Image (cartoon, grey):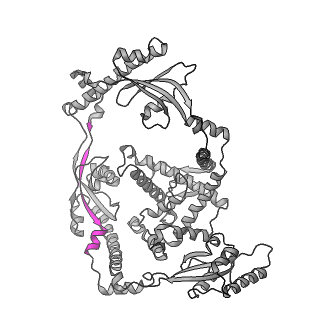
Amino acid sequence: MLQSIRDKTSGWIAYLIIGLISIPFALWGINSYLGGGEEQPVALVDGDKITPRQLDYAFARYRERLTSIFGGNLPAMFNDEAALKEQALTQIIEETVLQKYIRDEGYRVGDNQLFENIQAMQVFHKDGRFSKEQYQNQIASQGYSAAAFEQELRRSQELEQLNLALVSSAFTLPIEVDQFNRLKNQERKLRTLTIENNIDAIEISDQDVTDYYKTQAASFMQPAMVKLDYIELSLDQLKQKIEVSDDKIAERYAQMRDQLTQPEVRSASHILLTVAEGVDEDQVKSKITEIKSRINQGEDFSSLAREFSQDPGSAEDGGNLGDIERGFMVKPFETALFNLSVDQVSEPVKTQFGWHLIKLHNVSGGETKSLEQARYEIEQELKTDLAESQIYDMTESLASIGYEQSSSLLPAAQQLELKVQTTDWFTRSGGEGIAEQEKIRQAAFSDQVLKQQLNSETIELSDHRVVLVHLNKHKPAEQKSLDSVRDAIISTLKKKKGREQAEQQGKKILANLTSGSATLDSSSESLSIPLVDIGFVKRSSVSVDKGLLNAAFRMTKPVSDKLVFDGLSSNNGDYTIIELSQTRVDAADTTGDDTAKALAGKISNYEYLAYIKTLAQQADIQRFAVKDLPQ
């Protein structure tokens, strides 16, 4: 019942992975570790199932990204949940196809490369360096094991390999770059004449208003509204009521000592000699032994590492490997390193990568938090454990009582000692408080709650909350009175008629200009409308209205100094006549390697998208309409 609470699926881990993948649709979550019972799939890709849970996860991330793009408030155009889910499903299908291709073609990321990338992630750093404790705590807080996170990260980096392969193979021809630059840097000389939408001069009769009100009746409906009664179970509220004894805290502290111990970190350098195919290993061992002898005689370790080490990642830096914790190096290397004293150099160590000499520079960490230092953390963890158990049981009781005594919330509220609360009025499209949640609004206007006036089923919300709702009041949709919308209708009709008049007048002038019976100057003078001399502009000019600029660069180029004219109706109802008299290209702006690189980058992105679409078209895909899936 409370699987979403137990999964703890907040989102920064997903965004961290997305940030590592240079693909435009990466909505893949760590879904293979959120599994449950058998579910009807939302799609089949070459026989592999995409589950509703995967879709819900991807959809949630999609909404979060859209909400962030629009400053926290999602526009009404995105209220169609089914349409957004269809988009998210398409993206999951494409990534599933891509993952299968990656697997079949043998793209792989080795352990060393994976761990290097993890250690470089700032989110896992503490005091300026990688912390294994920070790493474990961060991924555990999201409900994931290290193995699960590392497997998903490995998949992401394998995707990146394919992307980079396609990007690196993209190229452009000099003639393409030249044509692109000429179009990009073309300048056009413009003058404009604008006939304004003079709404103040427009008269609207009462009959006009009445006629519009009748013909557009559907536009003047007050939407149905409801108020709900509800009772809420909250993990945070339950935690506040729980008391944890000192004995329980001490017992948990004893169990958590390993987790509360800061891992020992060792800063080291190494010299690596690899064993190439066809090379006698004894020769390599002899060479590493000779280098060890030179170190014993006082030669500088880092200088010898720069001269002899065959590790491309550390040789130039004197063999420096940075900070290392247990579990991040192969066993023979780790065993040798953690047996060294500071400034000591190991004997030659054999691993699958070759022969190493290891020098230890510094040792830090290994401290364990005291009981008092860890008390608050442990207390909150114990409270959370107890509260999760309670809220699970209470939710089962809430669902049972709410169903068995479905005509009222009072029985459930009394037995579970919960307060009945009431929302403000809200509509299907929006509300405040819990009515901000799409799930609440769907339940409120369902037949069960609205028509049968029964309790809803339990509804899981964000922040580990569960609610049960019941109808309090209902206002059916009704026609707004003419008087209440009169001013809005008058304003609409004025804008509409003013636009029509401006466009009619503008097109008449445009016809005269095109035929040659008038000029822009004479038209400006006869109408007493100022003529605007814009001069030469580029496509990228920011000083000119974007709509006007786009229209100007769609116009046919002048031939033999013959003027070209066009008209543009603006959003505010003004009509602007555009005169194009000349085009030119600044030769100084048509060269440069940066343009070729940028153009190749765009081409590679299109090729990558086309590659994904092709793979999807070749796959055996069966998808089910989101609206037809069981809720």
Quarter of the figure with the C terminus: bottom left
Q: Confirm whether residue 352 shows in the render.
A: no
At horizontal 59% and vertical 84% (from top left) the residue drawn is 337
Q: Quadrant of residue 214?
A: top left
- Magenta run includes residue 534: no
Q: Confirm whether residue 275 shows in the render.
A: yes
Given residues 443 and 133, the one toward you in this image is 133
Q: Position of residue 623 (x, y in %)?
A: 53, 50
Given residues 331 and 256, the one toward you in this image is 331
In this rendering, position of residue 596 left or right of residue 390: right
In this rendering, position of residue 374 left or right of residue 204: right
Quarter of the figure with the N terminus: bottom left
In this rendering, position of residue 512 left or right of residue 162: left
Q: Position of residue 600 (x, y in %)?
A: 62, 46
The region drawn magenta spans 221-243
Q: Quadrant of residue 372?
A: bottom left
Q: Position of residue 506 (x, y in %)?
A: 39, 19
Determine whether 454 is above or below 9 in the image: above
- Magenta run includes residue 236: yes
In this rendering, position of residue 127 left or right of residue 226: right
Residue farthest to the left? 483
Given residues 217 and 577, the one toward you in this image is 577
Q: Quadrant of residue 557?
A: top right
Determine whether 428 is above or below 267 in the image: above
At horizontal 18% and vertical 31% (from top left) the residue drawn is 483
